[in-house]
Image (cartoon, rainbow, N blue to C red):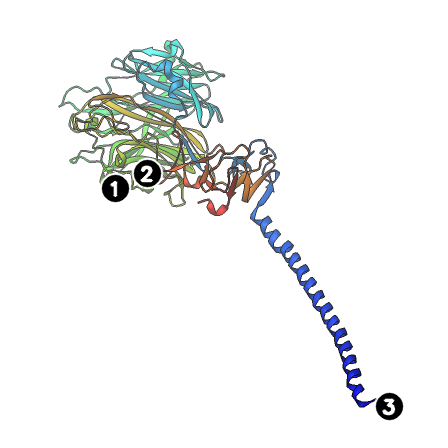
Amino acid sequence: MDHPSHSPYIRNTLDEIANRDSTKRRLCGHTFLLVLTLLNCVALYILVVRQAAAAFNTQLDAAVFSTAATASIHGKAVSLVAADGSLRAGAGTSVYLDAVSMASMDSMMSDAMTYFYLAPSGRPGASSVLATYYMPESMTSVLTTVMIKSPNLALCDDASVTNMVPNVQFQGIVTLNDKQAILLEAGGTNLTAVLVTINADMTVVYGTNKSRRAYVATGSIANTIGRISATQFATTYYDPYVNATTPYYQNIRVGTVASDGSITMSRPLRIGMANTATDPSTMSTPVALPAVPNGFLVTYYNANSLNASGLCVVLVTSNATAGASILNQLCNTKYQPAYFVDSTPVADNTVVFAFHDKNNNYALTLATLQVTSSGQLVFRGDYVLSAVAGSFDFGTFYSWYPKPIVRALNGGTNLALLFLNPANAGRPTTQVLQATSSFAWSPVSPLLPLSDTGFTLVGATAEAMTGTVTLDLVPLSTTSYMTVYSGEMDHDMGSGMDSSMPGHMDAMEEMNPLRISVVEFLDKPIGVGTSNGKSVVLNGRTKLSDANLRAGSTYFTTTMGDIVAAQSMGDYYMVGNSTLVTADARIGIAISKDTLDFSCSTVQ
């Protein structure tokens, strides 16, 4: 038997060997668990992080929206067309201030261009509108067309010699159909309706043939013309003024155009109350009411504090046998218009009137009126632009009345407004509104001034002087319209003005404002087209070819889809010197020279 001292040594050695085997097994187990954990982390990264990244940079094939869109959305911001959900380049609201470059009109600018009026071509989707203006120095009226090349580019055509008419003033133009329009022409003391022929190539021809001209009135102090149907129009005018004690009235005559172009005028229809030199009434342009056969509405009002009438509306119908006759009339004393009233139909039996309400601090007001099936006139509601208020206390410019312009767009779903803003030095301003179910309106855009910041109608004195600024507006599509403001006046800025100030005109300097602009409003941006134009980035980063972005800057889109930087002007943003965009055109932030981070959260 071994010595007792040898036994512990053997046992310890065996225990050590056993412990080593156990350690190896534990080490293998730990290694296996570590590898398994790492594999799980990799899987988690693939499943979560990469998927999240993919979600952050969401793209859709453009064909999902429209197979025809791929050629036009290359590197452009896009939105959906409300009518059919198709994709289009462009988003938000844009105002192209100088759509008609004044440089392109140099050949016509030897004289001022005043009383600039616009009318549709009569053809849906046509790329031109009719235009007339008056040149006071040569006492010549001009008939021409404005051709729209793109939302930011239009050209005013040179007028033919036969369309430049001396010693007359065109006081309005209405389009009857795609081949005919009517001019209201004042020459000497006579007022005449003149047929205009619209050719297939969109050129226009002034009617010199006697059969295409019709006498309307003599000695009228103010006149209007409105379209009633494809073959009828209505004119308003006043009896000749005799003296301060002899009353005179306002009248309506309806004109009918035969297939050969000859014009027949109805007998005069007297409306409203008698006028005197100190107690006159003011009429509006006739507006068609399709729900009433050959029906139309005309407003008048007396703003004299002794005989204030409120807003008076007359429903008139006409036929070839009986002429024009009154069906109904109503005066609403809730409203007291000041200056002129304009109107537009928004449905077959519904009309919106625009005016400055003397009863409400001269605020620009939209009043909606319906004609019921029984022929009753009912006011349904109103909308007040409280930011467009206050009287036109514009010093030297008491010799003319401002007239807001309102036109229905998109079947009456939207309204386009154009007005001189008394709260902003009389600057020409526009706004787009959307209908609500309660006969009210909600803004689609903020108030958008169309003039440069130096423009002002505020004079230093209250002397009455010759001068006028007129406005007009014509729809181009369901989501766009053209505006114009023009005029000629002596502007008394007073001797205390600094002549170095931008937009300043020396005391008593002549001013000839003229600007033709295009306004377009689309849905909000939903994404940006990729560089190949085959897909749309709905959320995340996108590279823009040939871009020169400034990292950290916010970028906007125009309605043409161009991605642009803009300077905040408060309620809107300025792109360069000639384009305005709105907050809903914001698309994202640049993170590098050629990369834009687009997110739905950046779209207001």
Q: Residue at x 40, y 44 (%)?
A: 436
Q: Give the SS element for disc 2.
A: strand
Sequence-first disc among 3 and 2: 3
Q: Is residue 48 above or below residue 207?
A: below
Residue 579: percent from the left, percent from the top? 40, 31
Residue tagged 3: 1
Front position in the image: 408 or 261: 408
Mark 3 touches mark 1? (CB < 8 Å)? no
- What element does badge 1 sit on? loop
Give the distance between the C-alpha atoms of the residues marked 3 and 2, in whole angstroms. Answer: 123 Å
Q: Residue at x 84, y 88 (%)?
A: 2
User: Looking at the rendered structure, which numbered label has been put on residue 366?
Assistant: 2
Q: Residue furthest left?
A: 245
- Residue 185 in view: no
Label 3 to label 1: alpha-carbon separation: 131 Å
Picture quadrant of residue 537? top right
C-beta proximity under 8 Å, tags 2 and 1:
no
The N terminus is located in which quarter? bottom right
Amino acid type for the residue under numbered disc 2: Leu
Q: Which mark is residue 334?
A: 1
Image position of 95 with respect to 570: above or below: above
Q: Residues within 10 Å of mark 2 (few under 14, many from 20)?
A: many
Q: Residue 440, image x and y in percent?
A: 36, 43
Task: Find residue 57 and report its horizontal and vertical position in percent.
Answer: 57, 46
Query: What's the residue type where badge 1 is placed?
Result: Lys
